[in-house]
Amino acid sequence: MASVAFREAPVLAQREVAPGVFLLRVGGEFAAEPGQFFLLRAWTLHPLLGRPMSAFDLEPGSLSFVYAVRGEGTRLLSRLRPGDPLTVFGPLGRGWERVPGKVALVGGGLGLAPLLLTAKTFGPPLAIFLGFKDAPFLVEAFAGLGEVRVASERPGGAPGAVSGLVTEIFDPRGYAAAYACGPRPMLEALYERCRAAGVPLFVSLEERLACGIGACLGCTVFTKAGPARLCKEGPVFPAPEVLDG
Ligand SMILES: Cc1cc2nc3c(=O)[nH]c(=O)nc-3n(C[C@H](O)[C@H](O)[C@H](O)COP(=O)(O)OP(=O)(O)OC[C@H]3O[C@@H](n4cnc5c(N)ncnc54)[C@H](O)[C@@H]3O)c2cc1C
Ligand code: FES
């Protein structure tokens, strides 16, 4: 497992890939397992805490993140330009482990963030299901990594996407396991379908956290086995431990 470190990394590129959604690439040699995250900080005093972001892509000499602007921290990140410094702390958390056989990766909206590195690390055979509220973004990054299917809730449809929810285009039957990240209602719906099909589901919960290193208990989630720290025992959990059903 890669050691956890603070690094100051120069921004190599940043572009808006959908309204309010940014792809940020920083320079340096990093390591991360699929599903792990980093705390990003582009400021000195305020906000107090770094902001957790999943490792989206790792290439020789760079690490990328994809994020939506939600509040002050992500607004400051969105102002970064090439050459600006960014403090990157990680990799953190426990990611996904591949099970043998054909697996499915399912992302809802920004839930695609941990899936590219997962697809690249896992390798075939796999299928990728991506769902969007509006026009799809970053789908091209997944080309060649497995079968890719895309759904969009946009009224009237979106080019290259089936109209509807990602849970409607994903049939769990025949997969050895499914790995998902996205809004809770999507995860709950997937769990119901996976459970009915007898397919194990592993989910990444992207809820609020603070220190990121297991010290403050500010990220406690209640699992069937007792309390767990999202930043340390998670963010990936077997679905039966954290979802109703
Ligand atoms: C392990 C992990 C990985 C994550 N990976 C990504 C990622 O790859 N891409 C991405 O876009 N986001 C990701 N997130 C969520 C991201 O960290 C938050 O959106 C971000 O910290 C918000 O910071 P802010 O200062 O802009 O907003 P704040 O000012 O802190 O909050 C603005 C609004 O967003 C809400 N909010 C803040 N954090 C979250 C959250 N985690 N979930 C839902 N609502 C929230 C607040 O309640 C508030 O209404 C991840 C979260 C975790 C825990
Ligand atoms: S954020 Fe502090 S223990 Fe997880």
Image (cartoon, grey):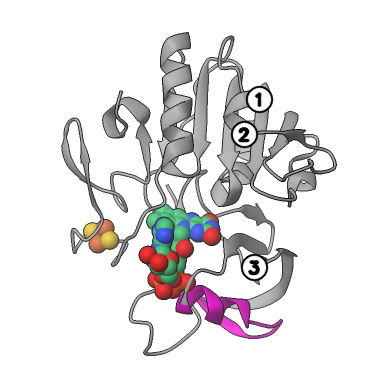
Please check the rendered image and state whether residue 75 is part of the magenta-colored stretch, yes or no: yes
Segment tinted magenta in the rendering = 72-91
At 80% from the left and 39% from the top, the residue drawn is 143
Instruction: Please tell me in which quadrant of the rendered image residue 241 appears.
Output: top left
Residue 121 lies in the magenta-colored region: no
Classify 65 as above or below 220. Answer: below
Q: List the residue tagged with mark 1.
A: 169
Q: Amino acid at mark 3?
A: Gly
Q: Is residue 146 left or right of residue 88?
A: right
Q: In 3D space, how far apart are the residues under numbered discs 1 and 3 (Cα atoms)?
A: 26 Å
Q: Residues within 10 Å of mark 2 (few under 14, many from 20)?
A: some
Label 1 near label 2: C-beta < 8 Å? yes
The residue lying at 64 percent from left, 47 percent from top is 133
Q: Badge 3: how crowded within 10 Å, few (<14), some, or many (20+)?
A: few
For residue 94, which quarter of the picture? top left
Q: Is residue 213 left or right of residue 204?
A: left
Amino acid, disc 1: Ile
- The answer to whether residue 39 shows anywhere in this view is no
